[in-house]
């Protein structure tokens, strides 16, 4: 997926399918995001392609659909973006708003990473590699965001919530992502 022509207008990436989540609020003091936090999620766990993540982020997850959902269906969480295994990009929250993705977190001594970050979920888990199309979409998205916002760093959820979170996990290839992102900047 090339990022040629990707645009972010009023916090929405035009190339993303928009599914609005109610789980967001205004950024504190209208702060401009400077950090990207990469996550991994699959619902049910270790299964891909279903509607579970979209349902979770839109508060429509049916507790009876899968045993795992009984413990999470009342969570009120979101991310700005979700990248499916085939590279499809879905946006739930405007980048200008605060998505509820990082939870208790800190980066460089600063607490509450949701206040100053953009959350990107990859459809995945800790035990399986991510797909090439996901890396391409992620690099294109981050490059697009960097042209509109002062993004200084891209980190994992495990970096901002160590000991509490493990995603994007050991199967995420940071060097591949960095090479793809660098190639877009040339």
Image (cartoon, grey):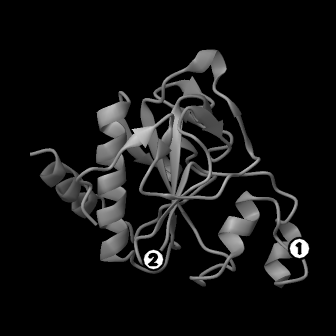
User: 117 or 95, which lies in front?
Assistant: 95
Residue 143 sits above or below residue 107 on the image? below
**Dot placed on the residue nearer the N-terminal end, 1 or 2:** 1
Label 1 neighbour load within 10 Å: few <14, some 14-19, many 20+: few
Q: Position of residue 36 (x, y in %)?
A: 44, 42
Q: Position of residue 119 (x, y in %)?
A: 53, 47
Residue at the location (38% across, 66% down)? Answer: 172
Q: How many marks?
A: 2
Residue at the location (57% across, 82% down)? Answer: 48
Label 2 neighbour load within 10 Å: few <14, some 14-19, many 20+: some
| Camera sees residue 182 | yes
Residue at the location (56% across, 33% down)? Answer: 106
User: 121 or 160, which lies in front?
Assistant: 121
| Camera sees residue 173 | no
Residue under numbered circle 2: 85
Residue under numbered circle 1: 70
Q: Position of residue 17 (x, y in %)?
A: 53, 61
């Amino acid at each position: 997926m090339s990022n040629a022509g990707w645009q972010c207008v009023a916090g929405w990436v035009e190339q993303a399918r928009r599914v609005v989540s109610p789980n967001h609020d205004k950024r504190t003091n209208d702060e401009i995001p400077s950090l990207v936090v990469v996550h991994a999620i699959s619902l049910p766990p270790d299964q891909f392609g279903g509607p579970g993540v979209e349902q979770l982020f839109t508060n429509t997850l049916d507790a009876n659909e899968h045993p795992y959902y009984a413990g999470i269906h009342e969570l009120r969480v979101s991310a700005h973006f979700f990248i499916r295994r085939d590279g499809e990009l879905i946006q739930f929250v405007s980048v200008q708003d605060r998505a509820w993705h990082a939870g208790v977190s800190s980066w460089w001594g600063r607490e509450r990473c949701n206040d100053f970050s953009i959350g990107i979920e990859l459809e995945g888990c800790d035990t399986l590699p991510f797909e090439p199309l996901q890396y391409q979409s992620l690099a294109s998205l981050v490059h697009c965001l960097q042209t509109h916002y002062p993004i200084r760093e891209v980190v994992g959820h495990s970096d901002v919530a160590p000991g509490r979170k493990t995603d994007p996990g050991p199967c995420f290839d940071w060097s591949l992502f960095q090479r793809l992102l660098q190639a877009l900047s040339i």
